[in-house]
Image (cartoon, rainbow, N blue to C red):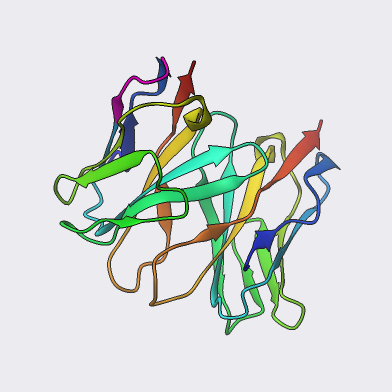
Amino acid sequence: NAGVTQTPKFQVLKTGQSMTLQCAQDMNHNSMYWYRQDPGMGLRLIYYSASEGTTDKGEVPNGYNVSRLNKREFSLRLESAAPSQTSVYFCASRGGQGANTIYFGEGSWLTVV
Amino acid sequence: GESVGLHLPTLSVQEGDNSIINCAYSNSASDYFIWYKQESGKGPQFIIDIRSNMDKRQGQRVTVLLNKTVKHLSLQIAATQPGDSAVYFCAENILGGYQKVTFGTGTKLQVIP
């Protein structure tokens, strides 16, 4: 049981390049999330998916797109990376009705130069 | 707007002493609170949670106290160990509703050997 796994761990992009962060969970959770973490800002929600087939914007969705490929996988795409998107990105998941604990992946360190 | 915040950004504690990490929240509708631990280079890890119908909950070496009157949450760690060194986040949520969790900015706990 690996929990939440995300790739890549580290990535350096040039401004304007695109990339996709991959995330998968093996806990059969319905809900999945993408957060970014910046110094002094805490975790901010980018997008979330309450269940397979649905996605919704969080606090800071601009510049990102997501895909809930199936129940296991939830990817985050940067179409045209900007230096302001330099951050640590965390994928997370949560179980079904009545489940409240969010489980996080190990993070993806992204630098846009 | 609503927010979750922490009183102390950094806390230094002697090994073996007890640690107390504080958190203030402002959303009076929140009814579920969580503490996470984040070690350097890793994702946040669930420690303990508490519902608003409780004022205290104990785990292994950790206790969470909730004071709804002053909207205050604290995490107590007994007999602090070097492995407790990390950043600790409090988070708030509304059970059964929108699945967004609001995180505080974190307190760094430094354990002095």
Q: In the visual, does B70 lie left or right of A11? A: right
x then y, percent, for residue B68: 69, 80
**Which quadrant is home to the N terminus of chain B?**
bottom right
Q: Position of residue B108 (x, y in %)?
A: 72, 41
Is A17 within the magenta? yes
Q: Quadrant of the C terminus of chain B?
A: top right
Coordinates of residue B88 in the picture (x, y in percent): 65, 48
Q: Quadrant of residue B92?
A: bottom right
Give the camera-side residue of A42 and B109. A42
Considering depth in this image, is A15 or B14 the residue closer to the camera? Answer: A15
Specify whether residue A81 is in view.
yes
Residue B33 lies, with reference to residue B13, above or below; the image says below
Left or right, B70 with reference to A18: right
Answer with left or right where residue A85 lies relative to residue B110: left
Would residue A25 be seen by someone viewing this image from the given angle?
A: no
Query: Which residue sits at x=57%, y=52%?
Result: B36
Name which quarter of the figure residue B80 lies in.
top right
Residue visible at 37% across and 21% down?
Answer: A16
Seen at 17% across and 57% down, the residue is A52
Would you place residue B82 above or below residue A25 in this image? Answer: above
Indicate the position of residue B98 as horizontal and vertical percent values. 39, 71
**Rendering quarter of residue A37:** top right
Q: How many marks?
A: 0
Question: Mostly what secondary structure, the magenta segment?
Answer: loop
Which residues fall within the magenta stretch? A14-20
In the rendered image, residue A55 lying in the magenta stretch gets the answer: no
Relative depth, front residue between A59 and B103: A59
